[in-house]
Amino acid sequence: MKFGGTSVEDAQAIGRVAEIVRGRLRRRPVVVVSAMAKVTDQLLAMGRAAGGGDLPAALERSRALRERHLNTARELVGPESFSQLRPELEHDFDQQDELLRGIVAVGELTPRTTDYVVSFGEAISSKIVNAAFQTRGINSTLVDARQCVITDANYTQATPLFDETNPRILSKVNPLVEAGQVVVMGGFIASTSDGVPTTLGRGGSDFSAAIVGAALEAECIEIWTDVDGMLTTDPRVCPGARRIKVVSFDEAAEMAFFGAKVLHPATLLPAVQKNIPVYVLNSRNPKNKGTCVRKRPPGRRGSFTAIATKKNISIVSIVSPRMLLAHGYLHKVFEVFDRHRCPVDIVSTSEVSVSLTVDSGRDVEAIMADLRRFADASCEDKMAIVCLIGENIRGTPGVLAKVFTAVAEGGINVRMVSQGASEINISFVIEEDDVAEAVRRLHARFFESEPKQRRVKRATAWAQAVTAPVV
Ligand code: ASP
Ligand code: MG
């Protein structure tokens, strides 16, 4: 069970976490926690202040963090336990201040030191959560994640070394779980084989949970956050948006590309590879069944799972008669984008033209100048990509017709289309101003008008998936 920053943001939130964990005790949970909300950002700002030589500003930030954490701990555990916990926390913050003085003394903040600075967030939050569990009668033990998750030395974005990490997790965590202890660990933080603190990249606690869950071969991984799982589309655009009950790993990956911020599926890979389902749940609404991410969703032939959009897109169109029957032309075109380090999203080609989409503002003027050296190139802004995602559209005839009929009925002009690559998404480009209308029409067509009978069948399939046993 992983609890993100907002799930441990204050004493009340941590109290809720304790109750959620208590409700899972029979399933022998291991708990991974983030730093309290906003703490990682504040630690980074503190480190930068020190790196810039401003010791008073850095120490002031450190003092504010000390106060927040001590107040939270005091409120959570009561005066008696707090008198034991306090010296430990004070010691950590003293160490933090010492580190800041060191950074000011050497006059620079390296990535290696940055990781040391931010590691205090999870190191301390996990101590407080563990103490809160204990005072609530939960048999819990703190395990230092830095002694379990071993990474390379790519500071701020380290990669786990599974050959070292997995045996460590098994030897340090498993015996405690077997003995009936709830293990509490900080997410995001790790260390090199030599014991130098590292981190797994921003938002890395989900990754930690997947690493630990995969090593222990957990029956499931729960990512507890502050929303009811993933939604079929952006509720601000389409009020009819609903919770997605089951999503495949590949679908979730497509959604993340379009900015679905709930989780980054790449971080779940260790779990998904082992076929361990991942649930996204809401610590403020624990009764909600959330969204399950798994390797393959149960069959829903012909239906979509989500509609994602990406605004602020430009269409670059390149026309050249020289393209006719020539080879190497596309190479030449893409070489320009490569040189400008500009990612391209959608591409469509004809014999003499290529259209592609890029994020607006990405050096587009310079790219256009380079393209015009060998072709007619034009650029249109204020475009958007709409993307329908669904594993089960593979091999289903007539889906495209339904999509474009729904869009055409809104009088919306489709500028580019792409289906293929992954076979689980249909993407098309329209004007930005048409996005809301298009999404509402598509959502109504594919998510709100299923025949009753099918919906019941689907609900049963989902219910089975959602009630799978949980560790
Ligand atoms: N605390 C870290 C961050 O804010 C890791 C996490 O919360 O997942 O990036
Ligand atoms: Mg997060």
Image: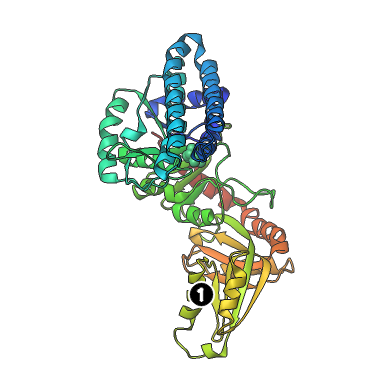
* Above or below 136: residue 29: below
* Above or below 424: residue 377: below
In the image, is the residue at mark 1 within 8 Å of ligand 1 by its beta carbon?
no
Residue sitting at x 57%, y 23%: 12
Q: Assign a secondary structure to mark 1.
A: helix
Mark 1 neighbour class, 10 Å CA radius: few under 14, some 14 to 19, many 20 or more: some
Towards the viewer: 3 or 232: 3
Towards the viewer: 182 or 164: 164
Residue 286 visible in the current orientation: no
Residue 252 visible in the current orientation: yes
Q: Quadrant of the C terminus?
A: top left
Towards the viewer: 206 or 461: 206
Q: Quadrant of the N terminus?
A: top left
- Counting from the top left corner in percent of width and height, residue 169 is at 29, 35
- Counting from the top left corner in percent of width and height, residue 319 is at 59, 84
- Going by the image, does 156 lie left or right of 300? left
- Counting from the top left corner in percent of width and height, residue 440 is at 69, 57
Towards the viewer: 129 or 125: 125
- Going by the image, does 25 lie left or right of 426? left
Please give the residue where the numbered disc 1 appears in the rendered image: 336
Determine the image quadrant of residue 207. top left
* Above or below 171: residue 453: below
> In the rendered structure, which amino acid carries the disc numbered 1?
Val
Residue sitting at x 54%, y 45%: 262
The residue at the far top in this view is: 80
- Going by the image, does 196 lie left or right of 441? left
- Counting from the top left corner in percent of width and height, residue 94 is at 44, 23
- Going by the image, does 48 lie left or right of 360? left
Query: In the rendered picture of this protein, how many numbered marks are placed on residues?
Result: 1
Determine the image quadrant of residue 116. top left
Colouring chosen for the image of the structure: rainbow
Determine the image quadrant of residue 147. top left
